[in-house]
Image (cartoon, helix red, strand yellow):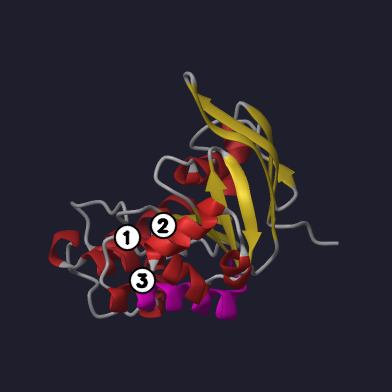
Amino acid sequence: MEPQPVVVKGLRKSFGEQQVLKGIDLTVDKGEILAILGQSGTGKSVFLRLLIGLEKADAGSICIRGVDTTHLPMDQLNEVRKKVGFLFQGGALYDSLTIAENVAFPLRRHTRLSDSERADKIRALLLSVGLDKDLEKMPSDISGGMRKRVGLARALALDPEILLFDEPTAGLDPITAAEIGALIQKLRKERNVTSIVVTHDIHAAHRFSDRLVMLKEGNILISGTFEDLEKSKDPFVEQFLSDAA
């Protein structure tokens, strides 16, 4: 039986006296698009950083494709990371590199593709996000939405099975935000990618996600469909939905 893409048990993380995550249990199915919601400072982005090993958990376990990554040596962790793409909030592009060079970065480091094979893959990746005509532009020459698309193309470079998105629609106009959401769904359809999306944009999450998880004070308050959240009588959930309306 194929292991689940992500299984988290009893995950805890504190910074000094501040408890950010207080024992998270969460399983994500293959091909699922999971949105993680919550107020600022509730540990949404910290959760993603723990998944990819940019932060170390205080307690609990994280299994990625059946491998417990919690205490892996760096060389073994890096092998697991190759199957996990991360789209940072602002795209996190290298300002001194062209769009094509940004996408090429992981290919140069982690593959043995020839120059022509690498060029073909870069063009295909940028075509998949609608930017195949902008290869030679610099990050400063393109919009915020386009930078996120380039970041997504780069995250896809090593053909990951899991994608992590940190606020992919933040700062975008509604049309561009909807386009990013459509891309997330397209990746599931074409590649069967499992996606975990941290967002405060509940309307976008409603459009593209299969399941929503809401964090409050370091715990999962509710997990379910958008309709489940709408039916909830919890005052915090009701207020969250009301404020987002």
Q: Amino acid at mark 3?
A: Ala
Residue 123 seen by the camera = no
Q: Quadrant of residue 229?
A: bottom right
Q: Neighbour class for label 1 at 10 Å: few (<14), some, many (≥20)?
A: some
Which residue is at 54% across, 53% downward?
235
| Labels 1 and 2 touching (C-beta < 8 A) | yes
- Image location of residue 133, percent across then percent down: 24, 80
Q: Which residue is mark 2?
A: 200
Query: Magenta span covers which residues?
Result: 178-195
Which residue is at 37% across, 70% downward?
122
- Check the image and report above or below for 97 versus 13: below
Q: Which badge, 1 or 3, is on the more N-terminal residue?
A: 3
Q: Main secondary structure of the magenta part?
A: helix
Q: Amino acid at mark 1?
A: Ala
Q: Amino acid at mark 2?
A: His
Q: Which residue is mark 3?
A: 119
- Image location of residue 65, percent across then percent down: 70, 53
- Check the image and report above or below for 16 versus 9: above
- Position of 195 compared to 203: left or right? right
Real-space CA distance between mark 1 and mark 2, rounded to the nearest whole angstrom = 8 Å
- Position of 173 compared to 49: left or right? left
